[in-house]
Amino acid sequence: MSSLIVKNALIVTQDKDRRIIKGDILVEDNLIVQVGKVTGDADEVIEAGGDIVMPGMVNTHSHIAMSVMKGVADDVPFGKFLDKVFAIDSDRQEKDLLAGAKLGAMEMLLSGTTTFVDMYYSEDIIAKAVQQAGLRGVLCWAVLDVQFTTQKGVPLDNCKRFFAEHKDQERIYPGIGLQGVYVCSTETFQASEEFSRSSGALMHFHLSETRKEVYDHKDKTGKRPADYLESIGVLSDRCLAAHSAWLTINEVKALGRNGCSIATCPVSNMKLATGGVAPIPEMMMNGVNVSVGTDGSTTNNSLDMFGEMKMLALLQKSYRWDPTILPAQQVLDLVTLNGAKAVHLEMEIGSIEVGKKADMVILDGKAPNLRPLLPDNVVSNIVYCGNAGNVKTVLCDGKAVVRDRHVRTMDQKKVLEESEPALISLRKGH
Amino acid sequence: MSSLIVKNALIVTQDKDRRIIKGDILVEDNLIVQVGKVTGDADEVIEAGGDIVMPGMVNTHSHIAMSVMKGVADDVPFGKFLDKVFAIDSDRQEKDLLAGAKLGAMEMLLSGTTTFVDMYYSEDIIAKAVQQAGLRGVLCWAVLDVQFTTQKGVPLDNCKRFFAEHKDQERIYPGIGLQGVYVCSTETFQASEEFSRSSGALMHFHLSETRKEVYDHKDKTGKRPADYLESIGVLSDRCLAAHSAWLTINEVKALGRNGCSIATCPVSNMKLATGGVAPIPEMMMNGVNVSVGTDGSTTNNSLDMFGEMKMLALLQKSYRWDPTILPAQQVLDLVTLNGAKAVHLEMEIGSIEVGKKADMVILDGKAPNLRPLLPDNVVSNIVYCGNAGNVKTVLCDGKAVVRDRHVRTMDQKKVLEESEPALISLRKGH
């Protein structure tokens, strides 16, 4: 058994009472076994010296292999954006995917994310990067109708094979990544839901990101996407819908009564100027579990959940002319507890409590941007003042995968050096 | 004469052609004397090793003494916010102001800001912090009508005295800080403009931040604030208007034809949910010089211009449903060249060119969030991927005031330790 103590921290527990505790945390193997005053020794002692400890964040929508594609399609109309990104993407080699996945995994760890949901083809390659990095990946293999894909074989079959091969691997949670109603037929959705029901796999899908996709679908089927998904019987608490911006209140209620989660992606929606602002207050009122995702690096262009928290809070407040919407504590809940719930890991991660997995982030309490720092402003400081550069140390599954702002599990230099060749080769001819 | 070389950098010059150069920079005393290939030695050599060098940023609206007030009034309606902040503020002691100003100066340097505009009373205290920190401060003494102030004496007289005492001090640019039309009479504005004309002092004022202040003023005078300011003859190229969110197109044109600058504060406006979104595209089309400010730490709660750049670009894109608005290069221009112009220092700072003052920021080129890094995505990476934690080294006026993420000009530990007592004492009784 290995043990680790974090000493003298300001602990943002995110427990039921949202307690802020000055004290220590004892970790044995990958579990938190004590929170408060810890006496005795351990194999590794991290002296926090007043640093902030918070739960590792959960990013519930991303495409991390795109991390090497930063800046390929900024500031252009949405149609041009899609053409450019799809053209590059359809041409990608395994080594580019791996280079991107490694870089993305590194970016996430260094910015305090310990669990993420990914949607892509070739999730087996991404799984390698996740295993090496030592974070948790909910890896949803891209599923769509055969006539729309560049995948070899039937996407859902590929997804099932990936699931079977990875379901027992540590920190890997294979899932189904339905691309959206525009490329997935009723049959594809229903077959996926059947597989999800029998296997427990998460059913992750893009939903109502743009106005066009909503009205195209309505023209075709007579129903808006979320109404349609309910009508074909595929909504359940195994569903995690990304974006979910262009929804009516009836669709919000449909998501709520079926126990769905959503991953709102404010930075991506704003940068692409899709117009829709996810109706977060209505979702919360109607029982939808709201979580937060960064989306991929062509639309953000970052995997930074600090930026995402602030953007989300401010977008919601400003859009409604109401500064009381999404107070800091609620925002922090979305990226920890709600994120954990969205991927069905609420019993294992999302808070710093005895019995949970030790997924924790240590923020530099000596960073001037986080000071003055008191128990009653620490949550506000995390949400409104914090940035990824404040992350000093990250524990995932009990292991210190980041120390002193450096990823310990990967060859950081090598991963970075592989990123430019990947970008250059991807751009060629596009 | 002292000399300094920055070697092997990816230089974002912000010159007329927006050239990106791989090379070196030679600084002699406080001036840039060579950009490109530098041979020979210097007193200090900074090996950039592929790091990014960009001009120091210019934050054109802030109240840095409020840096110790983080989190005192989050997520509350605007009226409550004002009551709370004014109550605390009217009660402040000199030592709290100094503690806040020092902390704020540190936060700015560590996030890559080398020049800032401040509006507050007791700017003489803030000047002390600025001098110690080694950054440039355009310090605008709060001017308002006698019946509305807690200042001793007549505010404009205090401002004039401050100006006389500080106009020849290094890196200090004293200015006039008119609080707004709601507490400044026509006479106060006109007397200030007369002083500005004779002295060259910047005339900085809040303008049309909230809908209420616009309509209150219209009820009182028959004119909207910017129309009114033009009608009383106080608009000129010495004016820098903060916020400027609730403007008609006629007011935008008035600002443009009078050569005014504005400081848009997107984070502050969004957090307070003031509703107005500054009409940046129209301002640019009509010759208004647009720059960017963070506002104070009760409304942001940060002085981080990286966060501000991204928020501004995304707010404008999303508000107009147009992703082509404010492309990355334009955003970077606003926080460098336009910021310099707003404070009449465009001949001295804002770009990395021979003859300009050496105000430069070195960003960590080995930070995963900034990779892949190429000359043609570096600007996008700064704006959309960068964060304050990427700032390694900062030069202001030729001096390396930040090295290895540490402020060299101040006792960082002491400044931080003074911040909590200041916040606790300010909160008492409020």
Image: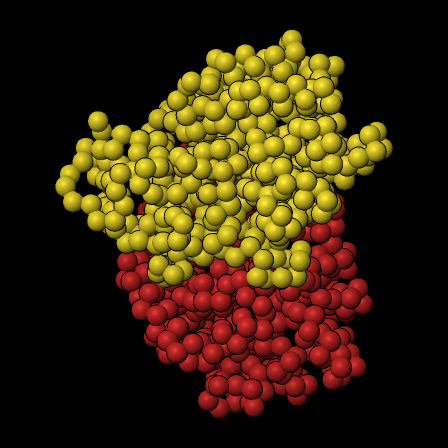
Chain colours: A yellow, B red
Q: Is residue A193 visible?
A: yes
Above or below — where is A38 with respect to B142?
above
The location of residue A429, given as percent across then percent down, is 68, 19
The location of residue A127, given as percent across then percent down, is 47, 20
Q: Residue at x 47, y 17 (%)?
A: A166
Above or below — where is B149 with respect to B307?
below
Residue found at the very far top of the displayed protein: A153
The location of residue A270, given as percent across then percent down, is 66, 45
The location of residue B83, given as percent across then percent down, is 52, 76
Identify which residue, B359 or B177, lies in the foreground.
Answer: B177
| Total marks in image | 0
| Image-based side of A424 in relation to B212, left or right | left
Identify which residue, A293 or B20, lies in the foreground.
Answer: A293
Quarter placement of the C terminus of chain B: bottom left
Quadrant assignment, res A56:
top left
Above or below — where is A373 with respect to B89?
above
| Image-based side of A149 in relation to A371, left or right | right
Q: Residue at x 62, y 67 (%)?
A: B242
Identify which residue, A48 or B51, lies in the foreground.
Answer: A48
| Image-based side of B62 in relation to B398, left or right | right
Q: Residue at x 35, y 43 (%)?
A: A352
Q: Is residue A144 visible?
A: no
Q: Residue at x 71, y 74 (%)?
A: B214
| Image-based side of B317 in relation to A373, left or right | right
Quarter placement of the N terminus of chain B: bottom left
Residue found at the very far left of the displayed protein: A40
